[in-house]
Amino acid sequence: MKIPKLFLGLFVGGLLGLLFWYYQKSTSAEDGALLLLDRLAAAEARIRQLEAEQQNTLENL
């Protein structure tokens, strides 16, 4: 059975499109995870700062 070249081209193009989409999806997820880690680190630093300020305030009373 001979497959028309049109269907073969569509199949290969669809496969390449799917691979490109998956690559974009995986890299954007990594960027999102790194952003969340940065936000977590900033929040933890702010918590430490507020705890230190609270401790100083309690000691000065």
Image: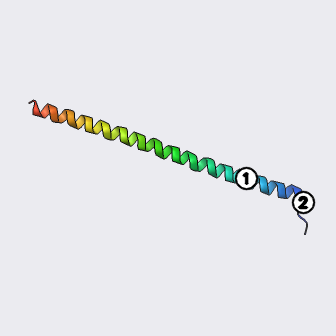
Image quadrant where one finds the C terminus: top left
Contact between labelled residues 1 and 2, with CB atoms less than 8 Å apart: no
**Which residue matches tag 1?**
16
Furthest toward the left, the residue is 61
Q: Residue at x 15, y 32 (%)?
A: 56
Is 32 drawn above or below residue 58 in the view shown? below
Upstream in sequence: badge 2 or badge 1: 2
Q: In the rendered picture of this protein, how many numbered marks are placed on residues? A: 2
Q: Residue at x 73, y 52 (%)?
A: 16
- Disc 2/disc 1 C-alpha distance (Å): 19 Å
Question: Which element carries disc 1, helix, strand or loop?
Answer: helix
**Which residue matches tag 2?**
4
Percent coordinates x, y for residue 4 in the rendering:
90, 60
Question: Which element carries disc 2, helix, strand or loop?
Answer: loop
User: From the viewer's perspective, is 31 left or right of 1?
Assistant: left
User: From the viewer's perspective, is 15 left or right of 6?
Assistant: left
User: From the viewer's perspective, is 53 left or right of 40?
Assistant: left
Q: Report the amino acid beneath label 2.
A: Pro
Image quadrant where one finds the N terminus: bottom right
Percent coordinates x, y for residue 28 in the rendering:
56, 45
Is 25 drawn above or below residue 56 in the view shown? below
Q: Report the amino acid beneath label 1.
A: Leu
Q: In which quarter of the image is residue 41?
A: top left
Q: Residue at x 52, y 44 (%)?
A: 31
Q: Which residue is drawn at 91% across and 66% down?
A: 2
